[in-house]
């Protein structure tokens, strides 16, 4: 589990330093798949609960595959440039990002109970939410904003995995439906707001 | 009592019918039909159910209580007004655009989600339906298919999604606080089973959860600091869409926030009061500054909406007897916004501008619209004898009664600034002499009916609150810890 959480932290940090939006979509997909594996390892014992399987399918298929692939297709050929800087590439902004990560991990360790694993899980989820907000404050380009918003969404779901009292099937289906709707709306608007590349 | 769910099922079915190509030609007739049926059903159910009755449906996921009765009837009344306006509007507006069936489909989906959100008895389910209203509204805002419209839709979607994500995060924090306090118990998100949460009110996670929920739902209400989506969206969207957002979605978000306050208000009174008062005052200050600065009448009404949201937030923070005033104020404001935004749409259509200094002599050129704008602005500013005046008075009384005289004085100053700034911008449009001959612009009588109805109800609420409606107000206030 520790390895998965560290990998998750890595998948969250990558988009900040990558310079192409394709890499960022891959990182978003990786976050979804890693959350699905975490859910499988922590919630797999409740195998008779359909809601758990809906949640795992949501993480693996929707967040891991559908969302990044769909958004990538929507932007392909329309984006102004293949490059995108989520965080300006200088030491000040990178430094702030690192401070956010350290603060979130410290915060996760401070909220009781102080078992190492839930604390790290909480820290990683908070890192995602705070970094997503940080990206949103820096981005004026729709493509960057949608990546920031999806990082926040993933962070909230990552936090949801910590709950021992799981939501019922109708609620899980409603949440999944809302996520699909959000991705579709984001994708359609992205396609209209991202200007085509010159000469294409 | 499953007839209650018809208010959501009928619009949902109507939206699905728009997938059938042969029915698309009758889209606006269907919209009007659903509006009539939905209003009839909600009014009939409310009249048939005692104010103190609480009916649970759909395995307790939905509830029909006094709050639901009041707001379901209200949003369906506004929806009927909007449907009648759109269906009978003869000008080249939404009804004549080639994608009229899309407008109908998304409006009906929006109304289905709105009714389900108001009915919801589950925090997460209610959250999902509020988010669904947001998703259904996006294509309505971008209806004109221009870059400006899409940009407004984008900002609306982005800020709403982020705000609602924070609300969801708040719910997770609340759940976590229960797990920490009472291991292996977990938090049931059913509103009628939240007593366990009140036992954990001292934990940090619990307080953070409450804070995030207030902040997130505050975004949907247009409260500062995340209010910037509201003026742009209300200004850019077509007037029927703006009316749906300002009078229907606002009240859906209000009910969602109200439910949270009903559940946690007693245990976290101080925290809730501080946060709501801070957000409310900040919103009123921001809106007052913008009302002074802007010369676009649609934006002035939009900023006035932020001002009203701020007043409502402060009233909710004060609690007690002020809740009666908050309810009256919220209901009145839904009707005021419906009158003003529908009128603003007609004025924009006829004059081709939203700038106040380019419009003069409305009473001569568009007598009915001039009158609606005049009375709507009076009600907006809290003049007697409109319902908003009484609501404001009761809220102010609640502030005095709870000893918050500094807050009371500050709000009086802000309201005075808004009053002067709105008056000096809006009234010259209405009263000053126009450049053109009287009655130059056609105003079909059928278009005026919904606005007459809303104005009539507004006046009635200010003079006399009918018995059954008063019972609903009193019952909701009682459930919130206020006096009858």
Image (spheres, rainbow, N blue to C red):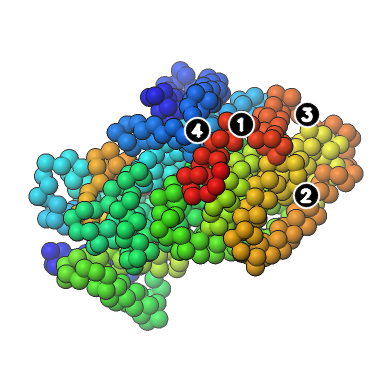
Camera-near label (3 vs 1) is 1
- Residues marked 2 and 3, same chain: yes
Choose the circle earlier in sequence order: 2 or 1: 2
Q: Is residue B222 visible?
A: no
Labels 3 and 1 share a subunit? yes
Looking at the rendered structure, the secondary structure element under dot 3 is loop
The residue pinned by badge 3 equals: B442
Look at the numbered discs 4 and 2 and tell me whether their residues touch, using CB distance below 8 Å.
no
Whole-angstrom CA distance, mark 3 to mark 1, is 39 Å
**Alpha carbon separation for disc pair 4 and 2:** 40 Å
Q: Nearer the viewer, residue B185 or B366?
A: B185
- The residue drawn where x is 55% and y is 57% is B318
For residue B334, above or below residue B156 = above
Question: Residue at point 28% right, 63% down?
Answer: A125
The C terminus of chain B - image quarter: top right
x, y (%) of residue A1?
A: 12, 64
Which chain hosts label 4?
Answer: B
Q: Is residue B240 visible?
A: yes
Query: As rendered, which of B307 and B99 lies closer to the eye?
Result: B307
* Whether label 3 touches label 1, CB < 8 Å: no
Q: Residues within 10 Å of mark 4 (few under 14, many from 20)?
A: many
Q: Residues within 10 Å of mark 1 (few under 14, many from 20)?
A: few
Name the mark nearer the viewer: 2 or 3: 2
Which tag, 1 or 4, sits closer to the chain's start? Answer: 4
Name the subunit of mark 3.
Answer: B
Tag 2, which chain?
Answer: B
Residue B349, image quadrant = top right
As measured in the structure, the alpha-carbon distance from the residue carrying label 1 to the one carrying label 4 is 11 Å
The mark that comes first in sequence, 4 or 3, is: 4
The answer to whether marks 4 and 2 sit on the same chain is: yes
| Among the two numbered marks 2 and 3 on one chain, the one whose residue lies closer to the N terminus | 2
């Amino acid at each position: 589990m520790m390895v998965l959480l560290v990998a998750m932290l890595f998948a969250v940090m990558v988009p900040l330093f990558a310079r192409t939006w394709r890499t960022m979509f891959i990182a978003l997909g990786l976050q979804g798949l890693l959350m699905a594996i975490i859910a499988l390892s922590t919630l797999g014992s409740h195998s008779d609960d359909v809601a758990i399987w809906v949640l795992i399918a949501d993480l693996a298929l929707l967040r891991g595959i559908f969302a990044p692939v769909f958004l990538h297709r929507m932007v392909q050929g329309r984006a102004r440039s293949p490059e995108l800087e989520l965080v300006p590439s200088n030491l000040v902004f990178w430094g702030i990002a690192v401070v956010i990560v350290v603060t979130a991990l410290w915060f996760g360790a401070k909220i009781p109970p102080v078992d190492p694993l839930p604390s790290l899980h909480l820290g990683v989820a908070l890192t995602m939410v705070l970094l997503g907000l940080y990206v949103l404050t820096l981005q004026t380009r729709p493509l960057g904003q949608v990546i920031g918003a999806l990082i926040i969404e993933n962070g909230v779901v990552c936090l949801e995995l910590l709950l021992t009292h799981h939501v019922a099937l109708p609620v899980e289906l409603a949440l999944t439906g809302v996520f699909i709707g959000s991705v579709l709306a984001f994708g359609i608007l992205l396609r209209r707001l991202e200007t085509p590349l010159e000469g294409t | 009592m499953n007839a209650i769910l018809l208010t959501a099922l009928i619009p949902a079915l109507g939206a699905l019918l728009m997938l059938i190509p042969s029915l698309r030609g009758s889209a606006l007739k269907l919209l009007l039909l659903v509006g009539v049926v939905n209003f009839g059903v909600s009014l009939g159910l409310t009249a048939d159910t005692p104010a103190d009755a609480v009916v649970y449906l759909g395995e307790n996921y939905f509830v029909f209580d006094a709050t639901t009765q009041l707001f379901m009837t209200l949003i369906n009344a506004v929806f009927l007004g909007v449907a009648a306006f759109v269906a009978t509007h003869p000008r080249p507006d939404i009804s004549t655009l080639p994608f009229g069936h899309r407008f109908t489909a998304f409006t009906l989906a929006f109304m289905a989600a709105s009714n389900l959100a108001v009915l919801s008895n589950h925090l997460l389910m209610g959250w999902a339906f509020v988010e669904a209203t947001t998703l259904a509204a996006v294509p309505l805002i971008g209806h004109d298919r221009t870059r400006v419209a899409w940009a407004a839709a984008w900002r609306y979607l982005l800020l709403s999604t982020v705000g609602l994500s924070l609300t969801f995060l708040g719910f997770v924090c609340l759940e976590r606080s229960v797990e920490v306090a009472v291991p292996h118990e977990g938090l049931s998100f059913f509103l009628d089973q939240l007593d366990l949460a009140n036992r954990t009110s001292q934990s940090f996670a619990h307080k953070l959860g409450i804070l995030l929920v207030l902040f997130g739902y505050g975004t949907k209400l247009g409260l500062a600091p995340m209010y910037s989506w509201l003026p742009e969206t209300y200004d850019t969207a077509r007037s029927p869409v703006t009316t749906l957002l300002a009078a229907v979605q606002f009240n859906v978000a209000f009910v969602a926030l109200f439910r949270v306050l009903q559940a946690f208000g007693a245990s976290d009174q101080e925290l809730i009061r501080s946060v709501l008062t801070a957000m409310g005052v900040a919103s009123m200050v921001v809106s007052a500054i913008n009302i002074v600065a802007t010369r676009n009448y649609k934006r002035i009404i939009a900023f006035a909406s932020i001002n009203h949201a701020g007043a409502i937030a402060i009233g909710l923070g004060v609690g007690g007897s002020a809740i009666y005033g908050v309810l009256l104020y919220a209901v009145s404001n839904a009707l005021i916004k419906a009158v003003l935004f529908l009128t603003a749409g007609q004025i924009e259509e006829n004059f081709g501008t939203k700038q106040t200094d380019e419009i003069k002599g409305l009473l001569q050129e568009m007598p009915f619209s001039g009158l609606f704008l005049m009375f709507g602005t009076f009600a907006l500013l809290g003049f007697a004898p409109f319902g908003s005046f009484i609501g404001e008075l009761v809220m102010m009384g609640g502030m005095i009664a709870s000893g918050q005289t500094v807050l009371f004085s500050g709000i009086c100053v802000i309201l005075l600034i808004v009053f002067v700034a709105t008056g000096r911008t809006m009234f010259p449009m209405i009263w000053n002499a126009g450049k053109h001959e009287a009655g130059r612009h056609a105003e079909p009588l059928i278009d005026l009916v919904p606005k007459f109805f809303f104005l009539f109800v507004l006046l009635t609420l200010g003079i006399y609150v009918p018995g059954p409606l008063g019972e609903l107000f009193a019952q909701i206030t009682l459930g919130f810890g206020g006096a009858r």
